[in-house]
Image (tube, rainbow, N blue to C red):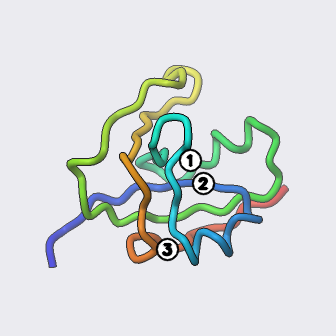
């Protein structure tokens, strides 16, 4: 087995069940699943929108050629780089990581 790049995705905790069944679905708007290189960075994007229960997923990226850097956020404000995967991410590539609640 080769080495894979690891990314993180955050979602509302309520989506856990459907994600474990269907994987991570790309946005209807731009066809991307958004990811970050650090787990805590993925959480920022939901926390700033007021979500109180967040789950993160560790993604073992098996098709890095479908990953692009995205620039739809202010990297100075969020203090991180963001990436998008073109298409859906299958269940076999992801695992739940941490639950955040406040």
Q: Is residue 82 left or right of residue 28?
A: left
Q: Secondary structure at mark 3?
A: strand
Q: Is residue 91 left or right of residue 56?
A: left
Q: Secondary structure at mark 2?
A: strand
Q: Which badge, 2 or 3, comes first in the chain's sequence?
A: 2
**How many residues crowd around disc 2 within 10 Å: few (fewer than 14), some, or many (20 or more)?**
many
Q: Which residue does the image show at 24% across and 58% down from the upper left? A: 63
Residue tagged 3:
95
How far is the residue under mark 1 from the one under mark 3?
15 Å
Circle number at residue 73: none
Q: Which badge, 1 or 2, comes first in the chain's sequence?
A: 2
Q: Which residue does the image show at 76% across and 37% down from the upper left? A: 49
Q: Quadrant of the N terminus?
A: bottom left
Circle number at residue 42: 1
**How many residues crowd around disc 1 within 10 Å: few (fewer than 14), some, or many (20 or more)?**
many
Q: Quadrant of residue 84?
A: top left
Proximity of marks 1 and 3: CB atoms separated by less than 8 Å: no
Q: Quadrant of the C terminus?
A: bottom right
* Residue furthest left as drawn: 2
Residue tagged 2:
10
How far is the residue under mark 1 from the one under mark 2?
5 Å
Proximity of marks 1 and 2: CB atoms separated by less than 8 Å: yes
Q: Is residue 26 left or right of residue 101?
A: left
Residue nearest the observer in this picture, 70 or 30: 30
Q: Is residue 67 left or right of residue 58?
A: left
Proximity of marks 2 and 3: CB atoms separated by less than 8 Å: no
Q: Which residue does the image show at 55% across and 35% down from the upper left? A: 29
Q: Which residue does the image show at 45% across and 42% down from the upper left? A: 31
Q: Secondary structure at mark 1?
A: helix
Q: Quadrant of residue 89?
A: bottom left
Does 26 appear above or below 5?
Answer: above
């Amino acid at each position: 087995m080769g080495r894979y790049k690891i990314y993180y995705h955050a979602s509302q905790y309520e989506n856990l069940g459907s994600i474990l069944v269907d994987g991570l679905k790309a946005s209807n708007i731009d066809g991307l699943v958004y990811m970050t290189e650090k787990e805590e960075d993925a959480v920022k994007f939901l926390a700033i929108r007021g979500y109180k229960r967040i789950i993160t997923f560790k993604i073992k990226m098996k098709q890095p050629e479908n990953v692009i850097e995205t620039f739809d956020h202010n990297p100075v404000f969020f203090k991180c780089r963001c990436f998008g995967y073109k298409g859906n991410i299958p269940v076999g590539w992801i695992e739940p990581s941490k639950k955040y609640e406040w």
